Structure formats: structure tokens, C-alpha cells
Amino acid sequence: MSQTSPHLALTFDDVLAHQQELLINTTFVVVDLETTGGRTSDSGITEIGAVKVCGGHIIGEFQTFVNPGMPIPAFISVLTGITDQHVAAAPNTAAAVAAFLEFAAFGSDKTSPILVAHNAPFDVGFLKAACVANNFSWPSPRILDTVTLARRVLRSDEVRNRKLGTLAEYFNSEVTPNHRALDDARATVHVLHGLIERLGNLGVDTFEALTQFNGKATEKRRRKRHLADNISTGPGVYVFFDTNNRPLYVGKSKAMRKRVMSYFTAAETRGRMNSMVELAHSITGIECNTDLEASIREIRMINDLKPRFNVRSRNPERTTFVGLTNERFPRLSIVRNPDLHDSARALIGPFRSREFAQIAIDALHDTLPLRQCTPRITTTARGPACALLEMGKCIGPCLDGSRTDEYNVVVNDARTAMQFDPSHVVNSLSVKLSGLARAERYEEASVVRDRVESLSSGVHRAALIRTLQEIPELVAARPTTSGGWDIHVIRHGWLAGSVHAPFGKDPRELLEACVQSAATYLDVVPLISETEMLIAWLTSGNTRLVRISAGHTWRIPVSARPYSADIAKRWLTDINTVSADLAEPVSID
């Protein structure tokens, strides 16, 4: 990374969630049923076959005959080869379906298996009916129908129809469907893998993208796939340009080429992205050493280039803070894009919106008798008292010159709460909250609760940003899943350098080279969004502090938030011990 070409990564939780949702990490339970007929109202299940797969590998199979409690029609026996003798001693429907559900182990979260079937409404319909008839709870898994997917993926000139036998032959399945449950489920597995592989080449790599794929990409978009030919496969930032070399869109990805390819397929369904791709004339990819570098470079480029199709470019660095006004009798006000290091203003934030900023102001007004009137007061003169004075919400410095010193004490209390320690305000509000809760005045209590949270969040975020921006140099590293290290040099709240040390290579040499080549930032205020991304990376996952400028510490400077003490304790680890930790490559068992 250089100073002349500025450089988020996904947070640790984002990366973990994305990895869990990738199709290669997704577990599928492919099921097929044989039945006595086509309607659940007068037919029963005769056989259940299922295959559980993940990452292209079979991890389990299930097969059982089922006694449907009724005779099997002769034409069904001819079709499937299953007769009344086969099912005479088989478990009944309740026992067989219960055994299948235990094998499938469906759950409610995004990591639970996905139910797959060819013509899923048929098989799922019989399974649901069996659950209802036997008072079972249907687990409501996510469902994928390979018939529907095949219609979206394969053109009519490729396959004559979407029957299982036709698709199995098209994808060179080793198993031929024969109307027996387990063999048909195995053939469906081959079809599923063939369809996923086909879509993977188009950049579709998650179940969400798989379900959103509609197969209707315009020919104009498809013809532009060659624009991605020179994009690398690793992490980085990509920029779409129009025919006049004006930036259209900036994005980032852990796998640039695959992500860029997805824009030219039906996997991309956003209307504005479709318009952007049709205007695109070229794409530039910028390789990055780490995911964090890619994400921060993306934010900087959006801020500098302001591409028309990035929503963020409309307000790339529009921040909302709360601060004290700079006048004789300061009051609280909402501030846009302030100098966070202006100690006289005691700024807190950023807040998500003016509404959240106002809630924090209400929290301070609830405890401290700061004036709330907006006119600038230059002198004190007696006059009619306002309602706030009568209610004890303001001490009225504008009316009585002898109270100027008293008002300054209030201002100093507000400044202390905003810059150093909000516990006095938070504790006062907490007492009020408890009283309202005991009185069962829950609606009022929720208002006070929101005020506590908004104020605490604003103080906490501002203190973290201010602290990191004041540190001349901080070097930190995080072990990667491959056994290496992602190392970053942070200077005054900027990402100044990054390097990835692969497994088996001494990271100290690369670390020192990264420090030597890192950019120097003097008297340049970093983007608030960049500093917050760095803070998120530093305070999540398994990040190790390697070194820090003399006379500085990296710790949570306030105790307003419940989790701050835990994070602070982690950063009080002896730096020499952590540095020694980094000396040996991490081994992944």
C-alpha cells in the first residue's frame, strides 16, 4: 500500500458468516420417495432414499422400505419393482419418516442442511402429510428443487426436458434413475453437483445467490464477460469504467474474478447494477494483500472517485456527532463532519442518524441542567424565566450573571461525561430506569433505556476513534485459517501498510519490511469510516498486538459499555509476550 494510491475487510463475523454460507460448505440432504400414487389424500409412501452431501462428498446415506398401510397397485409395482411383500415387514410411515428426519437433522439456522429433491413439491408434500397425520412437527428446512433450478440454468437447446433421467445422462451420472428411492436420490446428487458447477463458473457461490439466479441475463450483459479476463482471483478492489473512463462502480471481494463474473449473469438481479454493467466498458482490478486492505481501499476509492452507482458515494463520509457549541454559554448541538480532536467541543459519535444523536442529547439534558435555547448569549440580563428554568432543567445563566460560574461547572460535568467518563449520567439514568420499571411504566422506561444506550455508544465510539488516531504507529496481526498471518501497520488511524505472511515463512522479516515501506501520514485527518473499520478488526477475532509507539497504549478508554472491560483486558496483554507468539508460524491441526 502506498500513500499515492490509497487503500474493509469484512469483519471477523462477516467473514465467518460468508464462509458458512458458501455452497462448498453447505450440507444438502437429497431425498426421493416412492409412493402408491400421486396424491397425498389417498396414497402412501413405500420407500424413502436419501443422500447427505457436503463439499461434493457423500457423508451419509439413508434407505428404508415403508409399509403404507394399503395395497400397492399393480402398475406401481411394475414401475418401481416394489411389491406388497417388500413392505410387509417394513416400518410404518410414522417410524420411517421419524428415522429420515433424524438422519437429515434439519435445523432453523443458516448452517442447517438444505432439503433437495427433483420435483420437490411432490416429495415434500408427502413428507409434510406424514408429519401432520402422525402429529410430528415439520422442521421447515430450506428447500431446493432441481427441476426448477435446471429450468433456469439449462437452455432448451441443451436438454430436451428436465426429467431426472435426461439430466442424469446430460451430467454423466454414474447412477441411472430407476424409480427406486436411493438410486434416484444418488442420481439427483449428480444433477445437483452439475448444476452448482455450472453456476459456479458464473460466480454463483452461495445458496442465496443460487435461489436468486433467474437465468435471464441479457445477451448484452453476457457478451461483456470478457471484461473480467484479466481480473485476479485473490482479494482486492475492482472498478467498472464507462467508455469515457469515468468510474461507474467500486466493489471489493475476497475472490475478485468470481465476484466480477457474477455481474454478467442472472445471479445479479439488482436493477441499478444491471444498468451499470450495460454502461461498463472496462474493469480494473487492484490486488490487495489482505481482506482488510481491500475493504479500506474500497472505502477510500469511493470517497475519492464518487462513482455514480455506489450508494455510499452520495454521502461517502457524512458523519453525525454531538458536541458542545463554542461560545460563552455552551449548549449541545448536532455536528456534521467535525474535527474529532477539538477538545473544547467534547464531541461524541458518530451516530447512525440525527435521531440517534438527538436521543444522546436527551440523555445529557435529562441529567445536566444545560441550556437548550438556541440564541447566542453574549450578556446576562434579567428577564422572564423560561419553562426549563421553572422545571429545574436549566440554571438560567442568561438571567443572572452571578450564576455564570455555576453554569461553567455544569458545562465541565458535561465535557467530562462526553470525553472521559459518562458513568455519572448513566448511573443517574439507570436509577430512573429502575424506578419506572418497578412502577410498570414500561413505555417511559424504554425511552430512558434508549437514551442510556445511545449516549454510551456515542462516548465509546468517539473515545476509540480519538485514541487510535492519536497513536503514531500500531502494528497488529491476526492468524489466518491457512496457518499464516495477516499483518497491518496503522498510523494515526490510517491503514499505512499490510502484508500476508504465509504458513511456514517467518513473519518477522515480512513485518519489518512492511513497517519500513508503510505510508506516513502527517496532519491528515483519516476517514472516520476507515478508523472504525480498523477498530472493528482490532477488537474482534484473534488479533494480536505486536508493537505500539512508546508512551501510547491501545485499550478501551471508557467503561460506558458492558463489554468494554473485557476488550480492554485483552489489550493489556504484555506486548513482548505477544511478539514472541508471532515469532513461530501457527500450525493448524
Image (cartoon, rainbow, N blue to C red):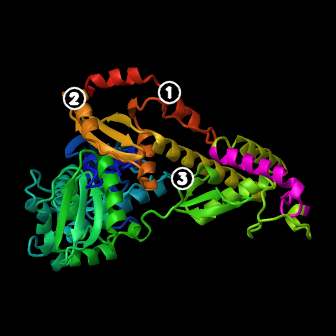
Residue 104 located within the stretch drawn in magenta: no
Mark 2 against mark 3, which lies toward the viewer?
A: 3
Q: Secondary structure at mark 1?
A: loop
Q: Nearer the viewer, residue 588 or 150?
A: 588
**Residue 100 numbered mark, or none:** none
Q: Which mark is residue 572?
A: 1
- Do the CB atoms of the residues marked 2 and 3 lie less than 8 Å apart? no
483 on left or right of 375: left
Q: Amino acid at mark 2?
A: Glu
- Magenta region: which residues? 390-419
Is residue 425 rendered to the left or right of residue 201? Answer: right
Inspect the image, locate mark 3, and give the three-letter code of the amino acid beneath it. Answer: Leu
The numbered mark at residue 340 is 3
Helix, strand or loop at label 3? It is: loop
Q: Amino acid at mark 1?
A: Leu
Say few, some or many: other residues with alpha carbon within 10 Å of mark 2 (under 14 / 14 to 19 / 20 or more): few
| Mark closer to the chain start, 2 or 1 | 2
Nearer the observer: mark 3 or 1; the answer is 3
Residue marked by disc 2: 509
Mark 1 neighbour density, 10 Å: few (under 14) some (14–19) many (20 or more): few
Nearest the viewer among 587 and 188 is 587
Q: Which SS class for mark 2? A: helix
Q: Are marks 3 and 1 in contact (CB under 8 Å)?
A: no
- CA–CA distance between discs 2 and 3? 36 Å
Quadrant for residue 39, please give it. Answer: bottom left
Taking depth in this image into account, of 329 and 498 the one nearest to the observer is 329
Percent of width and height locating residue 109: 43, 49
**Badge 2 vs badge 1, beta-carbon distance below 8 Å:** no
